[in-house]
Structures are given as C-alpha cells and as structure tokens.
Amino acid sequence: MSAADLVLVVMWVGLTAYALLGGADFGAGFWDLLAGGARRGEPQRTLIEHSIGPVWEANHVWLIFVLVTLWTGFPTAFAAIMSTLYIPLTLAALGVILRGSAFAFRKSVSTVALKRLFGATFATSSVLTPFFLGTVAGGVASGRVPPGNARGDVVTSWLNPTSVLGGVMAVGVCAYLAAVYLCGDARRDGDEPMADGFRRRAVASAVVVGSFAAGGVAVLHADAPELFDGLTGRALPLMLLSGLAGAASLALLVRRSYLVARVAAAVAVTAVIWGWGVAQYPYLLSPSLTVDAAAADPAALRPLLVTMGIAGVLVIPSLVLLFAMFQRGEGAHAATREDA
Amino acid sequence: MDSIAAVLAAPDLTSARMQMALSLGWHIVIACFGVGFPVLVLIAEWRAYRTGDATYDVLARRWAKALAVLFAVGAVSGTILSFELGILWPGLMGTYGEVIGLPFAIEGIAFFVEAIFLGIYLYGWDRLSRKAHLLSGIPIVLGGAASAWFVVTANAWMNQPRGFRLVGGKVVDPDPIAAMFNPATPVETTHMILAAYLVTGFGVASVYAWSWLHGRRDRYTRLGFIVSFTFAAVFAIPQVVVGDWAARFLAERQPVKLAAIEGLERTQRGAPLTVGGIVEIPKGLSLLAHHDPNAEVIGLDSVPEEDRPPVLPVRIAFQVMVAIGTGFVVLAIWYAVAWWRRRDLPRSRLFMLAALAAGPAAAVALEAGWIVTEVGRQPWIVYGVMRTSEAVTDAPHIRFGYYALIVVYTAMTAATVYVLRRLGRLPREADVDPAAPEPMEPA
C-alpha cells in the first residue's frame, strides 16, 4: 500500500468517525426539531442535550480532521472540490456555525422565547448541514467535480439526482443513528418510556432510510453509472453487509437490545461509506483524477502519516475516556442539576 | 443587463478578501479566549484548591460557563475558515497544500485534545475528584497554546515561504518541517500567543472594572479583577519587547511591509520615525529597526508599484496597535507600583476607567496587528511567490456567500454578547449550590 493509499484510508477512517459520531449529533438535532412544543418536547430535549453536550465539540473535530487530511494529502482534489462545490459547502459551513453556537446559547438562556429561538436554529441547522454535506458527497461520487479551480458547474454539481439522494440519505442516516443511540441513553437514565419512543423513531427511520437506499439504486443506475457499477461490483459485499447489519439493527431494536443495536447500526453506516470508497477507487475525482495523481509528494505525506500516528496515541485514549465518563449512568442527575 | 451579469459572475477578489477578513477577524478574537481563558479558569480553580477559598471556586465555575460558550463559538467559527481556505483560495491550497498542510493537521490534533478535555472538564465538575478535575484542565491549556502555535506557523509561512522549490510553476521537494519552522515562526507565534493572553486577561478584567465602577466592592469582584488583570499585566511588557523584535524582523526579512508601516517612500540611511503621524524623531526608524541610528532602511521605492501594499491602512493599524500596547505598559506599571507600595489596587477611578477600556482596546490592538500582518503582506498571499489574485477562486457569484456571512455573523455577534451578559448577571448563589434552581422567567 502506497503512502497515498494509507493517507486515503486514514481520511476515510476520519470520515467514518464523523458520520458515526458527528452524524448522530446532527440526528439528535433532527429529533429535537420534531420533539413538539416547548412543554411536550421538554424531556426529549433534555435527554438530547445531555447526550450530545459533553461530546459534540470533540465529534465535530473529525470534520476538521477530514478537511486538513484532504488538503495536505490531496491538495489539488481539495481545491477542486471546495471551489466547484462552494455553494453547498458555504451553506454547510453556515449550518455548522449556527448549529454549534445555537446549541451552546440555548443552554445559557432561560426564557422560553429565547430557548425556542436558539433551539429552532440548532435543530434546523442540524438537518440542513448534513443535507448539504450529502449533496457534496453526491457531487464527488457522481464524477461532477473536475480538477482545477472551480472548473465544474457550480449549480448542477450539487443539484442533481445523486446529490439530492446523498443529501436525503445523509439526513436519514443521521436521524437513524441518533435515534438508536438515544434509546440506550434513555435507558441508562432509567426512562424506559422515553427509550421506547426513540425505539419507534429508530425503527421508522431505518425503514425510511432502507427504502430510500433501495430506490437510490435506480437513481444511481440512471445518474451515476460508474458509481453504480462499482457499488454492484467490487463493493457489493460491503453493500450486502450494510443491508444485513441494518436489518439486524431493526431486529435488535424490536427486542430492545439497544447497545448491540448501536453496533449493528454503526456497521450498516460504516459499510456504506467504505462501499463508496471501494466503488470509486482508484479515482479520487472520477473520471479523471486518480488517488496517486492527486496525492502530495511522498515527502509531504510521510510527516502527515507520522502526525496521524501520534494523533492516534493522543486522541483515541482521550476519546475513550470522554465517552466512558459520560456513558456511565451515575452522575447523569448531577449533570441535570448543573445545567439546570 | 448582460454586462451586469458578467460582472457579477466574474472572479471576485474583493468579495473573497472581505469574506476572509470578516470570518478571520471575528474568529481571532473568540479564539484568543479559547487559548487564554482556560488558563484563567485553572488559576482560579487552583487557588480554590490550595486555599479552600470559596470565592475562587465561584469565579472558576462562572468563568467556565462563559468559556463553554466562547469555546463553542470559537470552534465553529474556526471550522468555517478551513472551508474558506478551499472555497475562496483554491489556488493557494491546490498549489501549496502539501507544503503548509502539516501544521494545520497538527493544529487539528491539538484542538482535538483541547475539545475532548473541555468536555471532560466542563461536564466532569461534580463527577471527578477535585484534583483530577484540576488536572483535566491542563490538556486544555496546552492544547490551546499548541493549536495557536501551529496555526500561526502557517501564517508565518505565508510571510516567509520556505520548504519547497518551484520548477515551471509546480511545487517540488516539499519539506513541511522546514516550512513550519520558517524564519517568521518564532516571532509571529510568540506575538500571537501573548496577544491571546492579553485579550483574555484585559477582556475579563474589563467586566470587573465595570462592576467596580458601579459600586460593587465585594471580594468576588476584587478577586475577579485581580486574577484577570494581573494575568494580562504580566504579559504587557514582554509583548512590547516581542513587538520590537517583530519590527526588527521585518526590517531584515520583509522590508516593504515595514516601509508601509512607516510610510517610508524611499530607501535611506538615518531614517526618521514618525509618531502618531505628527512628531518626527530624527533617525528614529533606523534606530528602532536596526538598533543603529545610521542604518539604511528599505523604502517602498525598492519594489515596483504593483508589489507594494496599501500604505494607509497598514500605517494606521500599526500606530493604533503600538499606542494601545504602550498604554498597557503604563497601566501594568501603575498597577505594579500600587501593589508594591500598598498591597492593594490603585485607588484612582481613572485607573479603573482605563482598565475598563483595556478589554475592548486589547481586541482592537489584536485586529490592528492582524491588519498589519495581512494587509502589509499584500499584494502577495505567499510573500514574493504567489499573488492573492492568483489564489482566488474562479467561481462566479461568490459575493452572495459574503453577504450571507455578514447576516449570520451579525446575528452571532448579537447573540454572543447577549448570552455572555446574561451569564454575567446570574445570581452568584447558582454557582455555589449546584442544586439551586435556575431563575426561570415566566413563560
């Protein structure tokens, strides 16, 4: 495996982590949006706030990780993607800033009107941001980003069938992951009725995402034939794994095995992301720019890989500590008091 | 109509620069608190731990709440910048991403550590032992300083590009380590980290100066002022020394920027220094820049007109920065003398008024310094190698992104100020007793 391939793998690990962790935080915002009026939605919003509060900033850093790896490892691809797809990326960036700050602001105000304003901003941007990021993925995956400075069509590169599918799937996957994770969080807090509520939402979103995925096959067949060939060819085992894991997560949700359902859901999403990578390889920007052609000089890739190694040693144990602390049941009520 | 459409669709350097200036100028102030505020919070918590003084504990907890808001806003406003590096400047990143990507990657890792431990610190207050909690704050401080250091090396590189060769317009032999440790790195990173501490310290002290001027003389106000103001005052004099180092560095390595700073038209020996645009000190500039009254100072005429930065904004910004920095030194000495003589704050109301002004002034000085560095480097995005106009995106209609940013940042500014003011007004008992209910306004 060349240094360029290794950097690509590391980047894809970062992308997967962002989808599984950052994605679930966006999904939590989706459920926050649908939680209902201020009074009725209060318990759900409290659970969501406690679940993502300590971790969302760390989860968000995976996005920065992907961006810096892309521009250091594959600078020409970064320049091409960011300049051609600047419209959805600007919208996603604004969504990122509104989501994060509104979430922090909501915790710090007490009037219902302001909580509503910041809450609505947080929740709406939690839905729009993954949608726009999904359209970016769709634009790249369907080969609509040529190399160079804004050489692609700045509109049709993200307003096209594959991008819309990508956007909708991204929102759906975020909602699905969040609902599955929140089942376990609610149970940890001893709130079985709430866990049941999120269980119903998780099942519903799994069914919706599953049917979109099935319908998406036809969209990709018509709109992105090369991607379709890759997904149904080399990447087929991963696609099948995703379907199986998704079905397993449904069965586990029905049986209320929430923690194992988390793993199954994460496997389902991970398999799709890696399936995309496998299907598109060796092209970073299909149909013209390969991974090797886009890669930085090995002299630049090596220190990057060393940095990533050090990062693994520093960041992974810290992350484990963070998650372990806030996945333990005790203290949840202390947190409630502190935030109240 | 066609021509209007064509103008709107043309590559738009001005909009790109304005958008970058807005988002970077906004982020940099907030980011300073992300770097400096954890230090203040930890000092307060450490004092509480050592002395058992509950007032320090209240300070630490209240500051941590403000830090939580500022850190969140800083994290997301920083993310936009990494988008914009590609959205607005694909020419820069596509060509030089492999040369300067590394410090950004390391900065990302440092920021990762900072964000993780901030989560642990903020939410672990009542779950960890006091000692473990105090220790969990240390990675935040180190991560903050490290991320500031690494990200500023990338800017230093834009002023002193190293670590690559250009062959036929293509980058070969990239050496990211050499790029990171370019000649501007030591002075720029030191200047920036000290600035972050000054902005935080004076910014927080301002809040307590306000309380003091409004008649609150309790122990909480006093300690809040002393901790934050002392923290800033300690760095005020070193910052002037580093500033002098920066000026001498420019004289040697980026003389055109220094010429713009001083409005020095022609290269000359024994160049005079103009203070505040009025008073002229003979041979002052030669003395300042080279520590030799008869040294030659390079003027703007050393380069063709199209390679010169705009003089007026750079000049004004520099003088504003120096004036404020000098004021800080006066303030720090005043404070130190009062403390040395009476073990107390200066009694004068004027001192407190000046301390009140010091917070906003520190932010102004920060922005002014940033203008000196960034505008003073123009027309280059990579000094002497790539023009800003060569780096900008060819995408059409980018001005609308800039307009959207203006709207969002205006709202963000209003919301941030509102929320911080509200946190400042909360009754303090809420911080002492974790079980105390938050004052709810009627729905």
Image (tube, coloured by chain):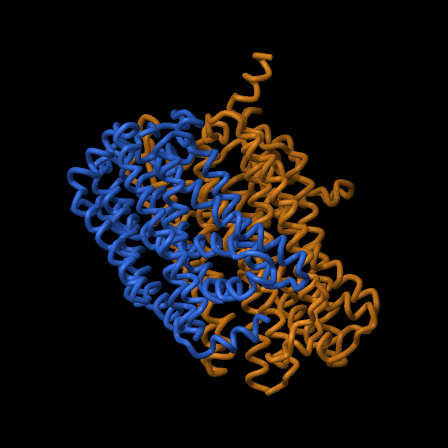
Chain colours: A blue, B orange
Taking the image as shown, residue B310 lies to the left or right of residue A65, namely right
Percent of width and height locating residue B326 = 70, 56
Residue for point 32% across, 30% down: B170
Location of residue A17 with respect to B405 vertically, above or below: below
* Residue B140 seen in this snapshot: no
Location of residue A20 with respect to A53 vertically, above or below: above
Tell me which corner region of the image, top left, top right, bottom left or bottom right, holds residue B57.
Answer: bottom right
Residue for point 60% across, 74% down: B60
Query: Among all residues in the image, which is located at the extreme top?
Result: B2
Percent of width and height locating residue A199 = 38, 61
Query: Among all residues in the image, which is located at the extreme bottom?
Result: B52
- Give the position of the C terminus of chain A as an image quadrant: bottom right
Tell me which corner region of the image, top left, top right, bottom left or bottom right, holds residue B20.
Answer: top right
Percent of width and height locating residue B10 = 52, 21
Location of residue B15 with respect to A248 vertically, above or below: above
Q: Nearer the viewer, residue B268 or B200?
A: B200
Tell me which corner region of the image, top left, top right, bottom left or bottom right, holds residue A89.
Answer: top left
Taking the image as shown, residue A231 lies to the left or right of residue A187, namely left
Q: Which of B382 and B213 is in front in this view?
A: B213
Location of residue B45 with respect to B181 vertically, above or below: below
Q: Which of B63 and B28 is in front in this view?
A: B63
